[in-house]
Image (cartoon, rainbow, N blue to C red):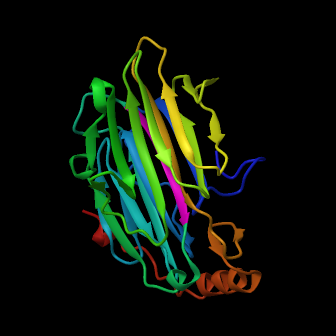
Amino acid sequence: MLPNRYTHKVGPFVFLDYVAPAVKEIINKDGMGAHPHRGIATLTYILQGEEEHFDSAGNYAKIHSGGVQWMKAGTGIVHDGNLNYDSETDSKMVQGFQFWINLPAKNKAEKPAHLAIQANEVPKKALPDESGWIKVIVGKYEDLSSKIPNYSDQFLYHIQLEAGKQFSISLTDEMEVATFLTTQNAILNDTEFGAGEFIEFDRKGGEIEIKNTAQIAIDILLFGGEEYIEPVVAEGPFVMNNQEEIVQAYQDFYAGKYDKINLLNKK
């Protein structure tokens, strides 16, 4: 979903991959394909299913439906994982998202790090008038604050809006903001958009009003942040600030400087 023909980034967010709802009958234990990253933090948010993470820094974790995996690639890391149905529920459905969050140049030179946040640890609060709820995956909202580090002004909210309800959120000027609709239509600032659409807003600040005219609850991802003003050069799994750094990222990877995944760390 990101980048697309209209925009290459929204605040620090430079990539969004959506795993649409699907039934998964077979458990995969062999990984989806180990690969490197440098210069970004990856964020995986699982609506349904469970995601297993292992990397060359020795981190291992498994999250279940509603959980989040965050990995700062920093100077370089190799990671892999499995996306399966949730072993803690009866559902065989999987659905989720992976974002890449671009790091400021100074943070690209830091050591890798990892966080696994289970669903009950994700900050959440009810919306007024029994309208639904909001989860703070990244950043802050009112008295809620995510555990995920902020290297710039950034946010990622999951909003669930009940049938026939509406909700408004105020944003400051110069914030780059976008939304992604999952499986239902929604009315945003009096314009109806369809399920699966990616919508970017202007930077004039003010309110975003969300209306649900459906007969069921709808889910909306709202994300963005301050503009990333440093140069952005992306190639393959690396996002750096110039082409020379991209070349160095590949050279370091092929020289084995990102280490290898030790499956003995997998539990």
Residue 173 horizontal side relative to residue 219, left or right: right
| Whether residue 214 can be seen here | yes
Q: Nearer the viewer, residue 165 or 82?
A: 165
Is the residue 26 above or below the residue 204 in the image? Answer: above
Quarter of the picture holding the C terminus: bottom left
Residue 243 image position (x, y, % from top left): 76, 81
Counting from the top left corner in percent of width and height, residue 13 is at 57, 59
Instruction: Work out whether residue 180 or residue 38 is closer to the camera in this orientation and state it.
Output: 180
Q: Is residue 103 left or right of residue 31?
A: right
User: Magenta span covers which residues?
Assistant: 93-101
Q: Is residue 14 above or below residue 212?
A: below
Q: Position of residue 175 (x, y in %)?
A: 58, 56
Task: Name the residue rendered at 59%, 30% in the picture.
Answer: 189
Q: Quadrant of residue 196?
A: top right
Our reading of the magenta stretch's main secondary structure is: strand
Is 30 inside the magenta-drawn segment?
Answer: no
Q: Is residue 23 visible?
A: no
